[in-house]
Image (spheres, helix red, strand yellow):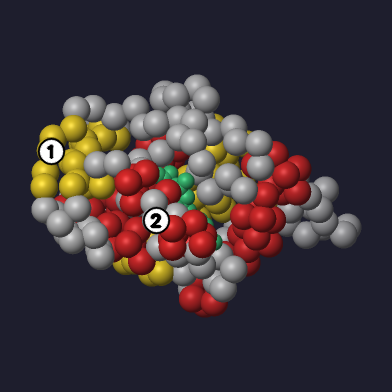
Amino acid sequence: MSPLVSAGVGAEAAGRGYRLGVDAGRDVVEERVCIAGRDIVLLRPREWESLLTEEAFEREELLPYWAHLWGSAVALAEAVAREHVSGRRVLELGCGLGLPSIAAARGGARATASDWSAQAVRATAANAARNGVEVRTVAADWNDPGVLVDGAPWDLVLAADVLYERPKSRTLLELLPRLSDTVLLSEPGRAPAQAFFEGAESAWELTEVSTRDDPRITVHRLLKRQVGHGRGGLG
Ligand SMILES: C[S@@+](CC[C@H](N)C(=O)[O-])C[C@H]1O[C@@H](n2cnc3c(N)ncnc32)[C@H](O)[C@@H]1O
C-alpha cells in the first residue's frame, strides 16, 4: 500500500536501540506531533517498508502498516482533542502507533487501543507511557473480535486509515454496529473506502468533522440510526 498521505509532522530526532516490541535494536526515530497546541512524542521504526518480510507477505496480519504514522491518524487525533471524552470509554481499532488513543487519554478518556499486530500494541503502550498517559492495549483481529465485542458498548470508537481493502471495509461494516453508537473514522480517500460509505448509509448518520490539517483527509462522524427513526429503520 502506498502512503497516499504521509504525516504532516515536524522534525525527527534520531534515536537508536529503542525496543519496539519484537523489533529490539531496530533503528527508530522520534516523531513529534503537535495536537491541539501540545506535542505528542512517538517512537516508530525509521523505515516501515524495511520491516517487510516474505513471512509478512504470506501472513497479511504481519504487514507493517502499523509502523508508519499515517496522516489520517494525525487528523483523527486533532478531532479527538476537540471532543469531550473525559471519563468516556474509547476504543481505537487499527491503532498503529497509537496517536488518537493517546490524544483521547490526554483528554481524560479511558482509552483502549487495539490492533491485530502485537508489535503495534506494544509500540502504542510504549508511546502512551512516553507521553505520561494510560492507554490499555489489546491485540485483536476484526475477524475474531470477541474481546472487543465483550467490552461493548464503547462510548466512542476511533479508527484511522483502516478502509484500504474491500474485505476490511466489509468486515468493519458488520463489526462497528456491535461496538458503539458513535464512531470517528478518518480516511484519505482510498478507493476501497467507497464501498464502506455506501454500505454505511443505512445504519449510520454520517457527517464530516472539520479539521485544520490535510484537505485530502476526511474525519467522519458516524452516529448509529435509531430503529424506527432513520432510513435504516423498520418504522
Ligand atoms: C494503514 S494502518 C493505519 C495505522 C494507524 N491507524 C494510523 O493511521 O497511523 C492500518 C492499521 O490497521 C491494522 N489492521 C489491519 N487489518 C486489521 C484487522 N483485521 N484487525 C485488526 N487490525 C488490523 C494494521 O495492523 C495497521 O496498524
Q: Is residue 197 depicted above or below 176 in this figure?
A: above
To which residue does mark 2 refer? Answer: 53
Which residue is painted at 82% across and 48% down in the image? 231
Q: Secondary structure at mark 2?
A: loop
**Alpha-carbon neighbours of circle 2 within 10 Å: few (<14), some, or many (≥20)?**
few
Q: Nearer the viewer, mark 2 or mark 1?
A: 2
To which residue does mark 1 refer? Answer: 14
Which residue is painted at 62% across and 55% down in the image? 168
**Which residue reaches farthest front?**
54
Which residue is painted at 50% across and 22% down in the image? 215
Taking depth in this image into account, of 155 and 202 the one nearest to the observer is 202
Q: Is residue 26 depicted above or below 77 in this figure?
A: below
Quarter of the image holding residue 119? bottom left
Say left or right for 159 vs 235: left
Quarter of the image holding residue 89? bottom left
Q: Earlier in the sequence, mark 2 or mark 1?
A: 1
Q: Is residue 68 depicted above or below 24 in this figure?
A: above
In the rendered structure, which amino acid carries the disc numbered 1? Ala
**Alpha-carbon neighbours of circle 1 within 10 Å: few (<14), some, or many (≥20)?**
few
Q: Is residue 78 visible?
A: no
In the rendered image, residue 60, in percent from the top left (x then y), is placed at: 51, 60
Q: CA distance from mark 2 to mark 1?
A: 24 Å
Q: Secondary structure at mark 1?
A: strand
In the rendered image, residue 53, in percent from the top left (x then y), is placed at: 39, 56
Say left or right for 57 vs 30: right
User: Where's the C terminus, which quadrant?
Assistant: bottom right
In the rendered structure, which amino acid carries the disc numbered 2? Thr
Q: Is residue 77 depicted above or below 64 in this figure?
A: above
Q: Do tag 2 and tag 1 residues touch (Cβ < 8 Å)?
A: no
Which residue is painted at 45% across and 30% down in the image? 5
In the rendered image, residue 122, in percent from the top left (x then y), is placed at: 28, 63
Q: Is residue 120 visible?
A: yes
